[in-house]
Image (cartoon, helix red, strand yellow):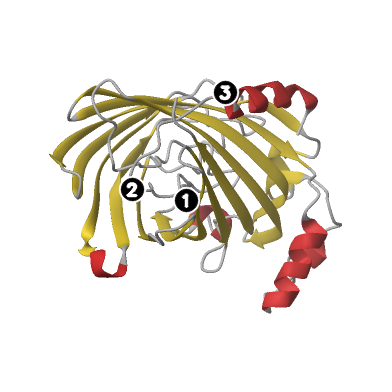
Amino acid sequence: MKKSAYPFFVACMCVGTAQAATPPPFPVANQNPFIQIFGIPTVSPWLQAQDQTDVQMVVDITNNSMIISAGNESISIDGESYRSAVVIRHGLTPDLQIGAELAYISHRPGVMDNLIEGWHDALGFSNAERSKTPSNTLDYSYHVNGVQQIGFQSGNSGTADPRFFADYALINTPHEAFNLNVSLKLGTADAKELHGSGGHDLAFGVSYAENQWLKDWNMTTHAHGGLLLMGDGDVLADKQNSALFYGGSSITWLSGSAIDLKAQLDIHSAAYDSALAQLGHNAIQLTLGGTARFGKTLAVDIGVGENLFTDPTPDFLINLVFRKPL
């Protein structure tokens, strides 16, 4: 990460948050560098109480290594991306919360290639795509007939598109939540460096959570889904779809001790009309991990994701969330 990114990161780490009684899902979205530019929402179904403000620091670290061709199209997604975001939620009324997400992103050559190749070997996963490129290099680029349409081979950093959202509760009890969700992502960031899409995106959805169905096993569940309307952007504009469907579900085991375990599945339909699987296929992302609590106030979520099912998702993902009461 560029030195200039550290003040933002350190400042965000010092911001406190309100910790919900029931751990929220992982706030993960697809971090494929050509897809993370869109406003696919992350959802926290347990709303903030009236006049309560929650602030989270979310860090996503992704590593990719693939060079693929299909027809006259080809794409290289080889490098690492670091995304740090402040997510603010405020309870405006007992049943209405509003919020914002402000993020900073860096695309770098990275340092984790050799570690991930060893991890894949240990688990029996293929490193066939990784063998096509030198370790710890950066090349995010898309070509048609061998001509680069967008991309870069040197690192860059900058602010990402901001996102604003509101959630209204139709059911709001300590044991069950059912909400209407709306979010707006503004296309203000640099699209050429894949910090944003260059277009405004509007999402409508619903979310549900409950902690009674599997209470005998100390488990809670959540599900969400919706439609993202994607404004005309500047990244592969002739290939970009105008809308996509998104959704997700998670299950959390409440251990009663310092660590709760989570498993989460997130999906979305194709963001582009492309023969390349990395752009034109539906995405399924599995994230495994948990919440570690330190004392009565600090909680840290740690999630690890792999592209076990589909090529549009990153080859390796680490999702970190820091929560602490004000």
Q: Amino acid at mark 1?
A: Asp
- Image mark for residue 22: 2
Answer with mark 2 or mark 1, whichever residue precedes in sequence. 2
Answer with mark 3 or mark 2, whichever residue precedes in sequence. 2
Which residue is drawn at the image coordinates 56% and 35% (left, top)? 235
> Which residue is under mark 1?
273
Mark 1 in CB contact with mark 3 (< 8 angstroms)? no
- Per the image, label 3 sits on a secondary structure element best described as loop
Q: Residue 102 location, x and y as percent?
A: 51, 25
Q: Residues within 10 Å of mark 2 (few under 14, many from 20)?
A: some
- In the rendered structure, the answer to whether residue 101 lies left or right of residue 62 reads left
> Which residue is under mark 3?
189
Q: Amino acid at mark 2?
A: Thr
Q: Residues within 10 Å of mark 1 (few under 14, many from 20)?
A: some
Q: Amino acid at mark 3?
A: Ala
Mark 3 in CB contact with mark 2 (< 8 angstroms)? no
Q: CA distance from mark 1 to mark 3?
A: 23 Å
- Image mark for residue 99: none
